[in-house]
Amino acid sequence: MIPVEKARQLIRDFSIATTPALSLNQIFEQYNIIYDEMDYGNTNYMGSLIRAEGKTIILVNTDIKNAGRINFTKAHELGHFSLNHKGEQFECSRTDLMDSTRKPLEIEANQFAKEFLLPEQMIKPISISAPFDFDTIKVISNEFMVSKLVAVFRILEFHLGNYAIIGSKDGIIVHHRISKSLVGKIKFSKSGDSLHNNSFAKQCLISNFRMTGYESIDPNTWVTRNKSGSAFTLKEYSRADKSFGSVLTLLKVDFL
């Protein structure tokens, strides 16, 4: 059974109607999964699924003090269990829980976690109707108990507008995603690239500058190639979390 279908089946089996993250511990108990969490002193290690001596154990690292990230790790390890991935132990790193991972079983576990925590039937209507901004991201993140990054990636899957998301840490891009409507049309800065000095994202990172909405920006600040053949304008909306050196950037394309 594919990951999305398995996640939906689990939601049906447990009659989950709101905030699936709240049901994770109940599911662990139902399947006799021993669950534990602790600080491991290694922020690259996220969690494990262990099968030993007839027992199933899920461990989660709480070094990263982010409840949404912890919930995604729990759901990811539950994905390994629910999808019956073969192996006595899965030790999952930060990279394994990112969409950029190339490991097939980790990809499946991420797909399961995403659909379980943010079910399409619940999130799609909101994504289509609500503005694509930080207020919407905050509402989804809080309501579904996931990180803002997971929330915005999921929203973008269903949003009908022309948007891109770029996440950076310490001035280097680490995440990027575009809406379906921009595929094959616009290419943006990618993972590993440095933030442009003229970007609002860079200003938010190095100063007390704070954005309250989208503002026009020179497309060359973010766009590396325009394959659409059409002229366009670009608007940026960035927010920084200086305690982590991270910036989340929303980009809006308006074709002329």
Image: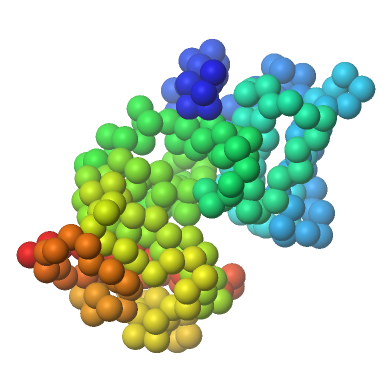
> Could you say which quadrant of the image residue 103 lies in?
top right
Quadrant into which the N terminus falls: top right
33 relative to 127, above or below:
above
- What colour scheme has been applied to the protein in the rendered image? rainbow
150 relative to 88, above or below:
below
Tell me residue 136's x, y (percent).
33, 51
Tell me residue 96's x, y (percent).
64, 48
Q: Name the residue at the top extreme.
A: 13
For the point 47% across and 32% down, the residue is: 115
For the point 52% across and 35% down, the residue is: 111
Q: Nearer the viewer, residue 227 or 122?
A: 227
For the point 43% across and 60% down, the residue is: 176
122 relative to 159, above or below:
above
Tell me residue 151's x, y (percent).
43, 47
152 relative to 58, above or below:
below
For the point 34% across and 55% down, the residue is: 178
238 sits to left or right of 207: left
> Could you say which quadrant of the image residue 74 lies in?
top right
Q: Nearer the viewer, residue 85 or 22?
A: 85
> Could you say which quadrant of the image residue 250 lies in?
bottom left
Quadrant into which the C terminus falls: bottom left
Examine the rendering and report whether any part of residue 141 can be seen: yes
Q: Name the residue at the right extreme.
A: 53
Tell me residue 145's x, y (percent).
51, 43
Q: How many circles with numbers are drawn on the protein?
A: 0
Examine the rendering and report whether any part of residue 97 can be seen: no
107 sits to left or right of 234: right
113 sits to left or right of 179: right
